[in-house]
Image: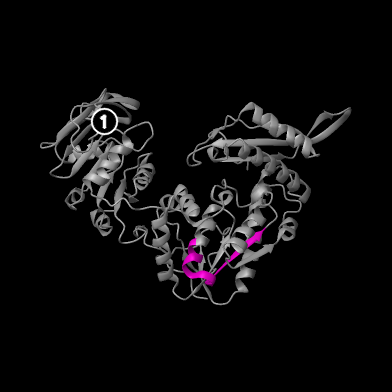
Amino acid sequence: MPGLAAAADPITPAIPAAATDQVVVLDYGGQYSQLIARRVRECGVFSELLPHHVGAAEVAKRHPKGVILSGGPASVYADGAPRLERELLDLGVPVLGICYGMQLLALELGGRVEGAEVGEFGRSQLTVSEQGRLLAGTPHEQTCWMSHRDTVFSPPIGFTALASSTASPVAAFESVERGIYGIQFHPEVVHTPYGQQVLTTFLSDVCGCDRSWSARSVIEEQVERIRAQVGDGTAICGLSGGVDSSVAALLVHRAIGDRLTCVFVDHGLMRKNEGEQVIAAFRDHFHVPLVAVDASNRFLARLRGVTDPEEKRKRIGAEFIRVFEEEAGRLEDVRFLVQGTLYSDVIESGGGTGTATIKSHHNVGGLPQDLEFDLVEPLRSLFKDEVRAVGAELGLPERLVWRQPFPGPGLAIRIVGGEATRERLDVLREADAILQDEIRKAGLYRELWQSFCVLPDIRTVGVQGDSRTYGNVIVIRAVTSDDAMTADWARLPYDLLEQIASRMINEIRPVGRVVLDITSKPPGTIEWE
């Protein structure tokens, strides 16, 4: 096999295809920076989020139709605060500054920015005195979302002040001639009702973007890229059953056909019927060459007597590597490894696109550094919701497209404080199946980030009929979240909880009590271990 591919340039463009119009979002540290990029994509324009310090030359390499400067937590007057590179204004494309980005534009171009006595955080009333080009079609009085303390008191010479708010004398300005625009409020958040309209105006009317970027265009672009990268080679994909690896596999299969082989390792720690669903979808429906390995006995043997969650993870990961290597070794001349790396992973690691070293957090379960493949990562420019849209466009079954996040070690780490025996796994699997069934019937599945059961190593006394029981406890955990960084416990209807608990106790003989976890993140985590 060839050696591992060299690490990618950390700022290699993440464009899906050269013909696609795109906008660069420069991140000045704002909490909503990723959201800006996502909202631009929702408008049908591809966007790439780059650190603010990459330089105008790197931005120019993308040939963007426009540049957006994000918000940020700093004061423009603070020591070490991010500065605006003046060359960005000489690229010949429109620039939109949001919050801190607007303040940078004002300061650089001679406007007056000062620290206000009163900050402006949360909902605010925006008064539009002149719609201009950027705020065209929006009402004169509207709600917006603010998050700042420094304030623009006067725009640069030659700029038109468009709006004000309670604490912001200049909440929006523009110079149509220079193609420079600034807004103090955050158009990317849902609390700004006309925010998406403002972004659309900037993208369409100001930048002249072709808003044709979509799930369908992603498929066409990535298939072309995969064919160019793989050529007449062969590839292997570690298929977990999650949406990321599933969509990556389908894209590669569409590009190179049967020269892709998927390896699905059933470690016996999955939810009820998930293994069968994956096999049915890929082998029977999509006719993707699939090696399905039932390794449940091997994994259970490795977990015998283990109660510590970290030790469970290590043993499961190590065993997965061995199984995957064995199956990969049976295939001839495999050069490429398909991974479901997402754009959020790239942003968080500071990386770009292209080939990269295989890391333990990737979808195939933590493959070692010396496993010699070149990487194919067709989802590397996509966020999770975009991956789901691509999956739906490819015809992936609904249960796989909308599959909630599931830990790599599976149910083993949801058996808390105890050994992951076959008997305990069966109890937890049945309880989880009931939970998912009832949540789907209630139409709540897509509203929840995650919903699952935990089986702690405790028993509790109860009464069934005229007899004393001493049964297992099942903990229900359901949360809502946008990105898993924070999460709130889901307020499931009481009638639904009653139905779930009743079914678990009546249908699963070892279960004697059902409880609900109402801890948010923070202070807790989503998973128990």
Q: Which residue lies most toward the right here?
A: 466
Residue 457, by quadrant, is: top right
Q: Which residues are magenta?
A: 251-266
9 is higher (above) or lower (below) than 509: below
As rendered, which of 391 and 456 lies closer to the eye?
A: 391
Residue 303, by quadrant, is: bottom right
- Colour scheme of the rendered structure: one colour
Q: How many marks?
A: 1
Which residue is drawn at the image coordinates 17% and 31% (left, top)?
161
Q: Is disc 1 placed on a helix, strand or loop?
A: strand
> Residue 429 in the image: x percent, y percent?
71, 46
As rendered, which of 441 and 259 lies closer to the eye?
A: 441
Local crowd at mark 1 within 10 Å, few (<14), some, or many (≥20)? many
Three-letter code, disc 1:
Asp
**What is the quadrant of the C terminus in the image?**
top right
Specify whether residue 72 is in view. no
Residue 284, by quadrant, is: bottom right
Tell me, yes or no, whether the highlighted magenta stretch contains residue 257: yes
Q: Is residue 79 left or right of residue 176?
A: right
As rendered, which of 466 and 342 lies closer to the eye?
A: 466
Tell me, yes or no, whether the highlighted magenta stretch contains residue 464: no
> Residue 460 in the image: x percent, y percent?
79, 32
Name the residue tied to disc 1.
150
> Residue 330 in the image: x percent, y percent?
63, 74
Q: Is residue 491 left or right of residue 65?
A: right
> Residue 199 in the image: x percent, y percent?
29, 41
Specify whether residue 495 is in view. yes
517 is higher (above) or lower (below) than 90: above
316 is higher (above) or lower (below) than 237: above
